[in-house]
Amino acid sequence: MLREGKNPGLKELKKNRGEGRLDRRNVGDYYSIYETIRKTLAKQLEISPDLITENTRIVQDLGADSLDVVELIMTLEEGYNIIISNDDASELVTVGQIVVFIEKQLKRPM
């Protein structure tokens, strides 16, 4: 369940296209995905995006709790129109790993 009033990541994703999902053809590059995730995490966790790098661990380094992680996963699933299984989510520890995962998902045929 999302925290009431705490879904700025989805807002960031929505403003890129004016709705809940991004055009998969235009967002598949690593840097674009990386920047979107940085901004999403920074807003969600109320921290500076400068603290977030490719090697930043979501839980250990940023102090995200399980609800924060679920919220991030749901935001990314909705924003990028992808599915992140529980098994996949448990393997995504760093920002860079999340970016690579999303990039691969976006390159898969629809």
Image (cartoon, rainbow, N blue to C red):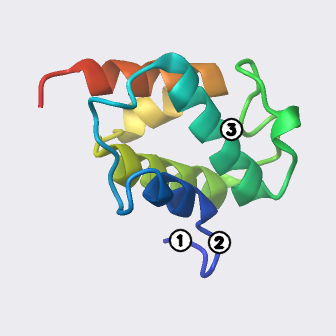
Indicate the amino acid at tag 2.
Lys
Marks 1 & 2, CB-CB < 8 Å contact: yes
Left-right relation of 75 to 19:
right
Q: Nearer the viewer, mark 1 or mark 2?
A: 2
Place of residue 83 in the rendered image (x, y in percent of width and height, measured from the top left): 29, 42
Q: Residue furthest bottom?
A: 4
Place of residue 72 in the rendered image (x, y in percent of width and height, measured from the top left): 55, 51
| Residue under pointer 3 | 38
Local crowd size for mark 1, using a 10 Å CA cut-off: few (<14), some (14–19), many (≥20): few
Left-right relation of 6 to 21:
right
Residue 6, numbered label: 2
Q: The residue tagged with tag 1: helix, strand or loop?
A: loop
Left-right relation of 68 to 25:
right
Say which of 16 and 64 sits in front: 16
| Residue under pointer 1 | 2
Place of residue 58 in the rendered image (x, y in percent of width and height, measured from the top left): 71, 37
Local crowd size for mark 3, using a 10 Å CA cut-off: few (<14), some (14–19), many (≥20): many
Identify the residue shown where x is 79% and y is 32%: 52
Please say if 54 is above or below 8. above
Mark earlier in primary sequence (1, 3): 1
Please say if 78 is above or below 34. below
Indicate the amino acid at tag 1.
Leu
Q: Measure how far apart labels 1 and 3 are at the Cα level.
A: 19 Å
Residue 80, numbered label: none
Q: Nearer the viewer, mark 3 or mark 2?
A: 3
Place of residue 15 in the rendered image (x, y in percent of width and height, measured from the top left): 49, 58
Left-right relation of 54 to 21:
right
Q: Measure how far apart labels 1 and 2 are at the Cα level.
A: 7 Å
Marks 1 & 3, CB-CB < 8 Å contact: no
Q: Measure how far apart labels 3 and 2 are at the Cα level.
A: 16 Å
Indicate the amino acid at tag 3.
Arg
